Image: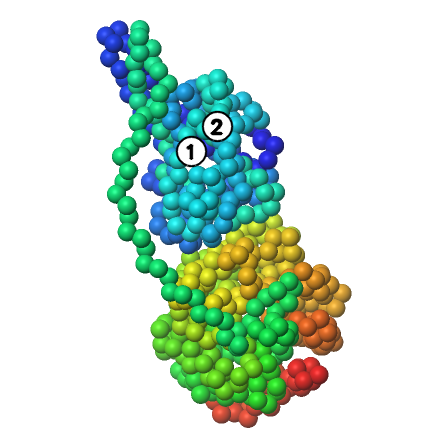
Amino acid sequence: MVASKAVLVLAAAAAVGLCGTATGAAQLLSDFPIFSAAAGESPTVADSSYNSGRAADTTSLVVGGGRAAVFTPNPYGGLQWYIKWPLSKVDGNQYSGLAFKLAADSEFVPEVTAGIQVQPNVQKGVPLKNYLTGGKARPAWQSVFIPLADLKAGPALVNTFSFFWQDSSGRLQPNLYLTDVVLLALPPSCGAGGAKLNTAPPAPPPAPPRPPPPPLPPTAPPSPRSLYTRGNGIFWQNGTRFAGRGVNVFDTRSCWACNGVQSVPEAKRRIDFAVGTMGASFLRLVLEAHLPNDPKDPDNSARWCAPDCRVSDAYLADIRELVQHAGTKWPRIQVLVSIWQTTYSWGETDLGWPAATSIDHLRRLVRALGEFPWVWFGVSNEPESNFAGAQDAQVWRAMNAAVAAVREEEAQLGLPPHIVTVQGTRNWGRSLAYYVSNPITAGGGANIVYETHPFNSVGEFDALFVNPSKTLPVVLGELGPMNGSMTTADAEAAMRRASNLSLPWTAWSLHMRCPPNILQDLSGGGCGVAMPLRLTDWGRLVLKYING
């Protein structure tokens, strides 16, 4: 079956119970389970999803716990469960309605129509939001009941062969999670001659009221040090546009360089050099973790940051000290704290998208750093591959879930929303094209900046950051000369073009062995603690454009 719009169809099947019997005894018609966390799909239904309307059954990244059917409400995409032969259809007059549990990646009003189909392309539906608490889907399970009587199907109800949820927005919406789907039966009610009357069951007694959840702390007012987005720009609280320029700096693990050292004072010294000597107003602090048995790391990089390479509490305390130092000593600095290496160790997907474990780490970062108004949160590093964009919608949903988690933690802490960056969906974080027509929606889309790493030639800049920046707040998180993709002349043009457009940028990288290198390697092959900090040719070019 193909509907005219995107649908999530939940088709139900059941044996029809008889009220009148030879002895006048009534037989109860059973409720019919359609989908549950424990059993998955009922054996009497089958899936016929289309246009990527259903993803693999999984636990929601934000609600946690239990199996769920994942509805991906793409425009014109649908998830469909239909009644298998030999039943093929069911008499809807024997049922009171559809009950299920629903959750979402973020709080939003779903523009979805829910209802039944009584023959192909003949739909009877109601707005799903009318049956949700406050009209919203949320990152928490809520029970939903849609009475079949509300659908006003009339005599056609006898031919019910499916239930549907249909996208009515024509645009991308966050994931919806569905479980414990049950078609509820009416109890038998025998009239004269044993005929079954179509009467709804009496309403159950009201449940005792639940105690209200503890109130969230009041949200603190924004600090003069915090930024906000408006239109395609990023602004200080006084309305001045922020167009910071700077470099990528490293944590105590320092790009595989600091085995057994992990010096907080050295990391502070390099921050001070970037700001005090080079004049940077914007830093991207990249976070490095390594776990043993990383499938992408056959050389076991965990040995390079011994004795501890995990995202441990001690490590987060070091990061907190660095961020606090930067903002306390340098009152005009902004610091983008970005999950960096490795995807396995941070718990991202194999392609570098946010996933449950990396989102948990992101929550920890918010708790550790959220009090600092000059901090930004980068939810990933570089989503890989996906060159043609076939997985753009999936990347978007992962990013949206990560942003939702940040906003939830901020609300729990009573913090105003920080700037959060989401990375390009394709080719190692390059392309922002999908976000132009599908901006992030979590948290109302407020204070979201779109980050690209344009290691490309001048001829590709329009597509990668110039055109997206016409409607979106854009930051160039990494750039620099790289063999085969970006020449020094290209990198210089990128800094010049971004500066002319008032786009913040951070050049790669304030290091001596993490190319392209801004520092000369005077470390003797070690961590570089206390080594002279002297610029390379690339470093001198970055210095020119930071101050140009």
Report the front residue among 140 and 363: 140
Label 2 environment density (alpha carbons within 10 Å; few <14, some 14–19, many ≥20): some
- Asked whether residue 150 appears in the rendered view, the answer is yes
On the image, the x and y values in percent for residue 390 come to 61, 49
Q: Which disc is residue 91 wearing?
A: none
* Image quadrant where residue 346 sits: bottom left
Q: What kind of element bears circle 2?
A: helix
Q: What residue type is labelled 2?
A: Leu
Q: Which of 136 and 205 is in front in this view?
A: 205
Indicate the position of residue 548 as horizontal and vertical percent values: 71, 83
Q: Nearer the viewer, residue 319 or 326?
A: 326
Tell which of 69 and 439 is nearer to you. Answer: 439
In the rendered structure, find residue 151 and report the number of the disc placed on it: 2
Name the residue: 33% across, 40% down: 38
Q: Do the residues labelled 1 and 2 touch (CB within 8 Å)?
A: yes
Residue identifier under label 1? 146
